[in-house]
Image: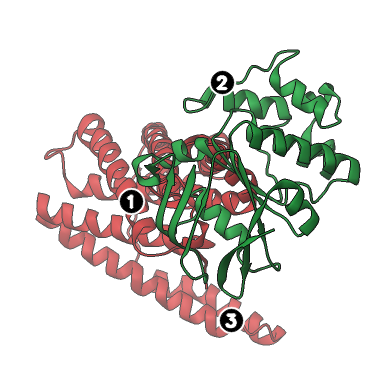
Chain colours: A red, B green
Amino acid sequence: MSYIALTYSDLAIAALLILINGAISLGLGLGLERTLAISAVRMVVQLSAVGFVLKFIFAQVSPLWTAGLALIMVLVAGREVIARQSLRHEGWRAWGVGTTTLLFVGTVVTVFGVGGLIQPDPWYAPRFFLPILGMVLGNTMTGIALTLDRLSTIAKRERVAIEAHIAMGARRFVALEGPLREAVKAGAMPIVNAMAASGLVSLPGMMTGQILSGVDPIEATKYQVMIMFLIAGATGIGVLLSGIGGVFLLTDERHRLRLDRLRKAG
Amino acid sequence: MLRVDHLRVGGLAPVSFEVADGECLAVMGPSGAGKSRLLRAIADLEPAEGQIFLNGIERAEMSGPEWRRHVRYMAAEPGWWDETARLHMAAMAEAGAGGATPSLGAGSRIERMVRELGLETAILDRPIAELSSGERQRLALIRAVSDDPDALLLDEPTAALDTQARALAEELIKFLVLSNKSVLVVTHDAAQARRLGRRCLLVANGRVEEKAL
């Protein structure tokens, strides 16, 4: 088994499929051709840019460059968490909760996985550190976004009951215990389901990639299983921490429910 | 005694007044004038500038939950977070560091109140969702006083009740006043205000005025 490199003409020929899609859109008057073209061009430009950046960073093998790119990934993921909220918190506090959780969980789990288990030389080798951080962040981000969104949506729906509890002297974590449990469950469900379904419906992307590049399927499976454990662990810790942070976002220091600080997302 | 000093609530001019121990003050005025917000602010359920004292202790000297165990707000539309009324009161009894811990057993003070308000004690174990609005309102009143708070802020506590049940609820409120509680009652019924106390706060046109009844 060996890796087969693609030529640019291979890519051009594959792009013909997108042209066929465009022709279908034109023929049926779906009006999708413009969006389709823009999306395809964006995909090519974004992936190429990432490819060049990674090539440069991998060549450096510098802890600073690795940390710098890792930080950018965390900041972008933190922004994405906020973008996925149907109810937005005023100010920067929600962004702070999402980003801090991602930074903590992403760092701890990736350092554990790369430095502790894979053990490349040096341990921060960007070729290992950055792709694994990316997978951990991508999944944890989804879990955190779901948790925070569900928490504020339930708090709004159950406002009367929560405020009744607070009026009887309950502290914030007592009054919001039910919504917090539900939100944490909602945030953890996708990764639990993904673990249960993986391998049956489709092969996970990383495993497919390794097999295509000539890695023995058993070795690829071992990597994929480890990654799934890392992702599941990170998501579990991430949704719990962000749920706790979410309770602080929804209340103030006097343990009052502060739904007045929430705005519907534009 | 509950003393409110230059409290700024929503669009209302700063409000100052006192309710003595063993006094009931009616809060009256048109819908939307800010009566509920005034009560919610006193219970520290929404932010408001100004000072509030309970028996000489300023609100800021206590945590929010501690304040609300002493100064109890009962909403016009009572909320429920558990399945039965008994589970609610058990949760409050468990959490009740501030007030007296209520006994929930047969013959307890809570069961006595349930009977005094014209209900069967079995209602404490029936699912809240199956109860009528009048039954829920009476249970909410019992829940509000179950752990013996010092001040009560009752928002239209008898709005969902028929004449007989309302009379029983008023008897309970009078009993609370006799037990030295400071009570504020929002009502649209001038006759009820006169039955319960001698003074009222009139909330209208962005102002709060104190009037004799």
Where disc 2 sits, the SS reads loop
Inter-mark Cα distance, 2 to 1: 53 Å
Q: Based on the displayed image, in which of its 4 quarters is residue A202 positioned?
A: top right
Seen in the image, is A258 located left or right of residue B183? left
Q: Which residue is mark 2?
A: B101
Q: Which residue is mark 1?
A: A134
Residue found 50% across the figure and 61% down from its top: A260
Subunit bearing disc 1: A
Seen in the image, is B142 located left or right of residue A51? right
Q: Going from the N terminus, do you reach mark 1 or mark 3 first?
A: 3
Q: Residues within 10 Å of mark 2 (few under 14, many from 20)?
A: some
Seen in the image, is B162 located left or right of residue A10? right
Amino acid of disc 1: Gly
Q: Residues within 10 Å of mark 1 (few under 14, many from 20)?
A: some
Do circles 2 and 1 both sit on a common chain? no
Badge nearest the viewer, 2 or 3: 2
Residue found 64% across the figure and 16% down from its top: B103
Residue found 57% across the figure and 83% down from its top: A33
Inter-mark Cα distance, 2 to 3: 72 Å
